[in-house]
Image: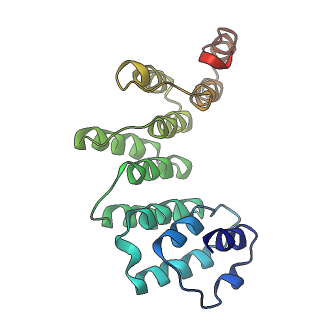
């Protein structure tokens, strides 16, 4: 049933989802995972209303889904409210909130939140660093981006993926450091991809 509901949401058939189907937190989380820029914000708000009525809001997976949904729909304020209203946050919660800040012009807030992640001892993942590199690209902080990429393997034991290197090339390009970006690509810092 969840796959059908997600398929309906992905294809803009939100009205079909309002047929009185009994939903659970797993369904809500899956549906929220398909939200994007072109998904109906009103539909997302209706889902949120249903979640409140059914008391699913304490489920961290549902809350994480709402952080992403509101951010993707352009409402950073509600993402922040949900994040800070969560009784228990997991690494996905922190990663979701870090990722939400940069596209809305709040890159420095993303970096501040990362410092809180470190202080609270939350496990950092490759997704954390992807969000941080993306943030550095938005704020033009090449040195900080290089520092994050370097610390992935050396400090955290996380091997960078192609996406991390692509973010670094994007960061260098946005900062106008095209020669360095070209050298980086030619130097084949892409690990096993080259």
Q: Which image quadrant for residue 93?
A: bottom left
* Residue 11 percent across, percent down from the top left: 76, 69
Residue 190 seen in the current view: no
Residue found at x 28% / y 44%: 116
* Residue 14 percent across, percent down from the top left: 69, 79
Residue found at x 57% / y 28%: 161
Residue 111 seen in the current view: yes
Q: Vertical placement of 59 versus 152: above or below?
A: below
* Residue 32 percent across, percent down from the top left: 56, 66
Q: Which image quadrant for residue 38?
A: bottom right
Q: Vertical placement of 114 versus 9: above or below?
A: above
| Towards the viewer: 160 or 109 | 160
* Residue 56 percent across, percent down from the top left: 40, 76
Q: Quick one: which residue is furthest to the front in this view? A: 1
- Left or right position of 139 against 125: right
- Left or right position of 115 against 48: left
Q: Vertical placement of 153 versus 49: above or below?
A: above
Indicate the colouring scheme: rainbow
Q: Which image quadrant for residue 5?
A: bottom right
Residue found at x 65% / y 8%: 187
The quadrant of the image that shows the C terminus is top right
Residue found at x 42% / y 66%: 63
């Amino acid at each position: 049933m969840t796959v059908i509901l997600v398929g309906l949401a992905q294809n803009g058939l939100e009205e079909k989802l309002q047929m009185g189907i009994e939903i659970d937190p797993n369904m809500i989380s899956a549906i929220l995972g398909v939200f994007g820029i072109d998904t109906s914000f009103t539909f997302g708000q209706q889902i949120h209303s249903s979640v409140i009525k059914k008391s699913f809001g304490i489920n961290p997976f549902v809350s994480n889904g709402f952080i992403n949904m509101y951010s993707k729909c352009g409402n950073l304020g509600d993402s922040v409210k949900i994040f800070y209203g969560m009784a228990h946050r997991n690494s996905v919660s922190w990663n979701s909130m870090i990722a939400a800040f940069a596209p809305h012009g709040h890159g420095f807030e993303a970096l501040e939140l990362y410092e809180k992640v470190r202080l609270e001892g939350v496990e950092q993942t490759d997704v954390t660093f992807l969000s941080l590199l993306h943030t550095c690209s938005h704020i033009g902080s090449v040195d900080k981006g290089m520092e994050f990429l370097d610390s992935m393997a050396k400090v955290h034991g996380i091997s960078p993926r192609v996406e991390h290197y692509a973010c670094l090339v994007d960061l260098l390009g946005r900062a106008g450091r095209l020669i360095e970006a070209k050298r980086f690509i030619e130097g084949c810092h892409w690990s096993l991809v080259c």
